[in-house]
Image (cartoon, rainbow, N blue to C red):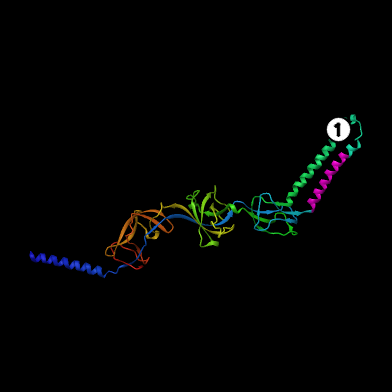
């Protein structure tokens, strides 16, 4: 009996030594240590866009003619209704003068008739004949005046006035040059009503809400981030060739306080619209260090005592573009990923950190 006991103890010792020998011969899996962050996590939707203005217009004459007056130049601020330019067109000017002459003749004819019978008796002045004749002259004067005013009104086609208060972006002509009908002479915009316009894909549009925060990076100011807010959503998708099927939204954007980096109309860039944000600073790790099990639960790989790889179940919060909020993970946990994407981590296998 004693001999059997000795055999059993010896066999167990050999087995333990063998297991230890085998494990000691196993090559540890190369792993990278993941840095656990304490940050605010934001989930965003990204898109490219351009700076525009709510009030922006290309102004042109409705008729063709020679430019006789050209007022404000590029960079000038103008008020609503301010006269910007005027042309001379011979046909319109001739018609205006002819109508004015006709009106003046009608007035003089009435005055001449009154002068002719100035010394007539009061009975004649009160007669139907005199009153009817005066009424005829008044009707002729009224018709001539109406015709003249109509032509004068049409002369507004020979003028360009500012449609709103704004800043002149460009002037395409000089005094003395010929302007064609419909040809842009002034480009004007209201710089106080700038916004960043972006087209959002249909699958993302449902997540966009009014007043959501937005981070805007402009190509012209690559090292700066401008803050904005979503303030207008469309009622339908675009149908044009440029953004067909997308939803164009408007984001209010402001210049920096010192105005050293002005935001100009036409600048392009990218925006991140914040659709979800953590409640302050939270524990987070890179999203690619989190895995999903077959049952839909989330887990991370950790390195525990003895440099053994272990799977650890976790719960996640806000999923950001770079980091994901992790619930139930302390800062002392060594979260790891495989140093070689081709090598799979296995629970219970030894691991060796290579990025320290």
Q: Place residue 261 in its image quadrant.
A: bottom right
Instruction: Name the chief secondary structure element in magenta.
Output: helix
In the image: residue 54, left or right of residue 185: left
In the image: residue 6, left or right of residue 77: left
Residue 248 in sight here: no
Q: Exactly how many numbered labels are in the figure?
A: 1
Residue 99 falls within the magenta-colored stretch? yes
Q: Residue at x 83, y 39 (%)?
A: 140
* Quadrant of the rendering where the C terminus is positioned: bottom left
- Percent coordinates x, y for residue 75 in the rendering: 64, 58
Label 1: few (<14), some (14–19) or many (≥20) C-alpha neighbours in 10 Å: few
Q: Residue at x 40, y 58 (%)?
A: 287
| Highlighted magenta segment, given as a residue range | 90-111
- Percent coordinates x, y for residue 268 in the rendering: 56, 59
Relative to 96, residue 5 above or below = below
In the image: residue 225, left or right of residue 319: right
Front-lying residue, 30 or 103: 103
Mark 1 lies on a secondary structure that is helix
Residue 112 falls within the magenta-colored stretch? no
Q: Place residue 37 in its image quadrant.
A: bottom left
Residue 275 in sight here: yes
Relative to 188, residue 99 above or below = above
- Percent coordinates x, y for residue 352 in the rendering: 31, 67
Name the residue that disc number 1 marks: 131
Front-lying residue, 273 or 339: 273
* Quadrant of the rendering where the N terminus is positioned: bottom left
């Amino acid at each position: 009996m004693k001999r059997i006991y000795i055999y059993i103890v010896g066999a167990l010792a050999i087995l333990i030594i063998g297991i230890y020998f085998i494990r000691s011969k196993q090559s540890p899996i190369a792993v990278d240590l993941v840095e656990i962050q304490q940050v605010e996590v934001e989930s965003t939707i990204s898109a490219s866009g351009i700076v525009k203005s709510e009030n922006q217009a290309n102004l042109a004459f409705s008729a063709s003619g020679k430019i006789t007056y050209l007022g404000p130049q590029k960079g000038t601020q103008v008020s609503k209704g301010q006269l910007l330019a005027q042309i001379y067109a011979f046909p319109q000017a001739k018609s205006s003068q002819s109508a004015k002459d006709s009106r003046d003749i009608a007035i003089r004819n009435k005055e001449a008739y009154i002068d002719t019978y100035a010394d007539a008796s009061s009975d004649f002045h009160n007669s139907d004949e005199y009153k009817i004749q005066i009424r005829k002259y008044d009707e002729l004067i009224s018709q001539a005046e109406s015709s003249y005013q109509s032509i004068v009104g049409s002369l507004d086609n020979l003028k360009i006035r500012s449609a709103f208060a704004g800043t002149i972006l460009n002037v395409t002509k000089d005094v003395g040059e010929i302007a064609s009908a419909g040809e842009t002479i002034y480009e004007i915009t209201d710089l106080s009503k700038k916004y960043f316009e972006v087209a959002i894909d249909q699958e993302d549009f449902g997540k966009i809400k009014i007043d959501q925060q937005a981070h805007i990076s402009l190509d012209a100011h690559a090292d700066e981030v401008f803050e904005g807010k979503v303030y207008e959503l469309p009622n339908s998708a675009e149908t044009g060739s440029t953004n067909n099927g997308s939803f164009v939204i408007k984001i209010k954007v402001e210049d920096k306080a010192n105005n050293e980096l002005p935001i100009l109309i036409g600048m392009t860039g990218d925006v991140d619209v914040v659709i979800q944000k953590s409640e302050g600073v939270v524990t987070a790790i890179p999203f690619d260090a989190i895995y999903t099990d077959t049952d839909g639960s989330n887990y991370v790989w950790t390195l525990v005592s003895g440099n053994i790889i272990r799977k650890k179940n976790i719960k996640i919060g806000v999923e950001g573009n770079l980091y994901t909020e992790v619930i139930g993970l302390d800062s002392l946990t060594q979260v790891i990923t495989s140093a070689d994407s081709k090598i799979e981590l296995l629970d219970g296998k030894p691991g060796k950190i290579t990025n320290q």
